[in-house]
């Protein structure tokens, strides 16, 4: 049974998009620590504030229910109205003596979402430089031109406490991240390909108690998959993990079930912000294999190289095949599975025709679902696994952890200097 927290907010404080986003970030940090949370909102505008919070949670991909609604299906988060004064009138963000100095690598779908989170709080974050491929492409993003650069190695030369890497891929990201860590920076990344294939290089930087490499957003968007798996592995023995962990493929499969062609389904996913311009890594299953490797490492302490995981994608599936499965009461899902079989880690990614009653079959559009079987029972997770706001929320949660480390554990970050 998860621990239970009650967070209270005065509706008078929830009076702007920035304040709502700050409240969501506070709630999410409790959720990803495995807590069950009830959010109580009081004050004259409590109904309105609960509506705003509900919209923000939905946008961030966090399932929630309204207190007293037995049909909500939300296990971890409940929103409630309260006439009692709040237990705390603070949104709870740690405050440092000076803003956290940040270099942001990448301003794509997720990068722009992260930037907008950061620039909403100039008292906390100073985004000193943003590295992009094409300056002209970002003229209308609302980013100060003087902060933009095209040379990745600015991440090494720019004075900064934190580098946020969102360019993806193995190179040049690998050299940039490694150099930043060697220079004493802290790094937050969503780069599952890099971490899964070069874990031996980066493992020592990711170790507790004060890791300088954080990567919650590498798997599951706002779904705290890696944290949950690691926490369960520390408490009991994990036997198997089954997961639908590629939101792009799930979105496309739902489109195919409606009779849409693969090309049209992918185009729709791209327009919706769930698929990259080149979707081949998603459709081939390689993205799911990279995520599965990280999950297996968290569950079992070791993992196969994602390039050696048995992997079949969805590129060959047709609308007729997917609709025929629906006609039999089945749902085709791209399922990633890892298990400890007599000390050997077995892993595979493949499309499976699941009974409609299977928990993974219920994943809808860009949603991710994870089922963790342990010696003591089964834990299930669900939430949006793709899109700007779910993934950027996970990145920002790591940034907030870095900020908290700076406030409470100053030695965890290097001393600031204009000559670094």
Image (cartoon, grey):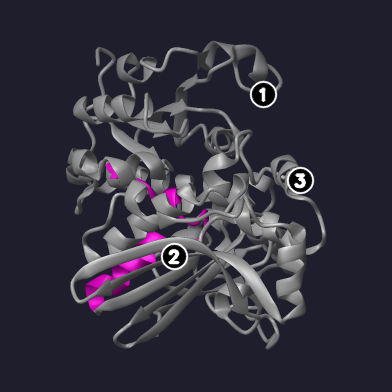
The one of 155 and 410 positioned closer to us in this rendering: 155
- What is the residue that sits farthest to the right in this orientation? 259
Answer whether residue 229 is magenta in the image.
Answer: yes
Query: Picture coordinates of residue 86 (x, y %)?
Result: 56, 70
The one of 117 and 256 positioned closer to us in this rendering: 256
Q: Is 163 placed left or right of 91 in the picture? A: left
Q: Which mark is residue 142?
A: 1
User: Could you tell me which secondary element the residue under label 3 belongs to?
Assistant: helix
The residue drawn where x is 56% and y is 56% is 385
Sequence-first tag of 1 and 2:
2
In this rendering, the label closer to the viewer, 3 or 2: 3
Relative to 150, does residue 365 appear above or below in the rendering?
A: below
The residue drawn where x is 81% and y is 62% is 258
Q: Residues within 10 Å of mark 3 (few under 14, many from 20)?
A: some
The one of 13 and 324 positioned closer to us in this rendering: 324
Q: Residues within 10 Å of mark 1 (few under 14, many from 20)?
A: few
Q: Are the residues at dot 3 and dot 2 in contact (C-beta closer than 8 Å)?
A: no
Q: Are the residues at dot 1 and dot 2 in contact (C-beta closer than 8 Å)?
A: no
Query: Picture coordinates of residue 192 (x, y %)?
Result: 40, 45
- The CA distance from mark 1 to mark 2 is 31 Å
Q: Which mark is residue 268?
A: 3
Q: Are the residues at dot 1 and dot 3 in contact (C-beta closer than 8 Å)?
A: no
Q: Is 256 placed left or right of 189 in the picture? A: right
Give the residue pinned by disc 2.
30
Query: Picture coordinates of residue 254 (x, y %)?
Result: 72, 62
User: Could you tell me which secondary element the residue under label 2 belongs to?
Assistant: helix
| Residue 224 appears in the picture as rendered | no
Q: Where, quadrant-wise, is the N terminus in this rendering?
A: bottom left
Q: Which residues are magenta?
A: 213-235
- The CA distance from mark 3 to mark 2 is 34 Å
Sequence-first tag of 3 and 2:
2
């Amino acid at each position: 049974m998860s621990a239970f927290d009650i967070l209270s907010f005065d509706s008078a404080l929830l009076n702007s998009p920035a304040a709502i986003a700050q409240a969501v970030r506070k709630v999410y940090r409790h959720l990803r620590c495995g807590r069950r949370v009830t959010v109580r909102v009081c004050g004259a505008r409590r109904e309105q504030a609960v509506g705003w919070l509900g919209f923000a949670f939905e946008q961030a991909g966090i399932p929630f229910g309204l207190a007293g609604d037995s049909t909500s299906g939300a296990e971890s988060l409940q929103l409630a109205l309260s006439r009692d004064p709040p237990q705390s009138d603070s949104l709870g963000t740690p405050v440092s003596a000076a803003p956290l100095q940040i270099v942001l690598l990448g301003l794509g779908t997720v990068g722009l979402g992260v930037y907008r989170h950061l620039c909403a709080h100039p008292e906390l974050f100073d985004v000193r430089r943003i590295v992009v491929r094409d300056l002209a492409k970002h003229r209308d993003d609302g980013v100060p031109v003087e902060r933009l650069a095209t040379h990745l190695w600015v991440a090494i030369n720019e004075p900064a406490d934190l580098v946020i890497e969102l360019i993806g891929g193995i190179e040049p990201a690998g050299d940039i991240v490694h150099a930043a860590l060697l220079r004493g920076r802290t790094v937050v990344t969503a780069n599952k390909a890099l971490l899964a294939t070069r874990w031996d290089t980066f493992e020592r930087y990711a170790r507790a108690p004060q890791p300088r490499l954080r990567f919650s957003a590498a798997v599951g968007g706002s779904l705290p998959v890696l944290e949950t798996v690691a926490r369960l592995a520390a408490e009991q023995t994990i036997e198997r993990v089954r997961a639908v962990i590629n939101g792009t493929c799930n979105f496309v499969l739902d489109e195919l079930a409606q009779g849409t062609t693969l090309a049209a389904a992918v185009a729709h996913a791209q327009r919706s912000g769930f698929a990259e311009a080149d979707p081949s890594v998603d459709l081939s299953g390689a993205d799911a294999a990279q995520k599965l490797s990280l999950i297996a490492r968290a569950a079992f302490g070791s993992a196969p190289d994602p390039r050696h995981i048995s992997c079949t994608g969805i590129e060959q599936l047709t609308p007729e095949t997917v609709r025929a499965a629906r006609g039999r009461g089945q749902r085709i899902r791209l399922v990633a599975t890892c298990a400890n079989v007599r000390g050997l880690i077995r892993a595979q990614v493949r499309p499976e025709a699941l009974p409609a009653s299977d928990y993974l079959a219920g994943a809808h559009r860009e949603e991710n679902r994870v089922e963790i079987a342990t010696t003591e029972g089964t834990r299930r997770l669900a939430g949006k696994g793709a899109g700007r706001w779910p993934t950027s929320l996970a990145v920002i949660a790591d940034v907030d952890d870095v900020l908290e480390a700076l406030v409470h554990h100053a030695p965890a970050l290097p001393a600031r200097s204009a000559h670094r």
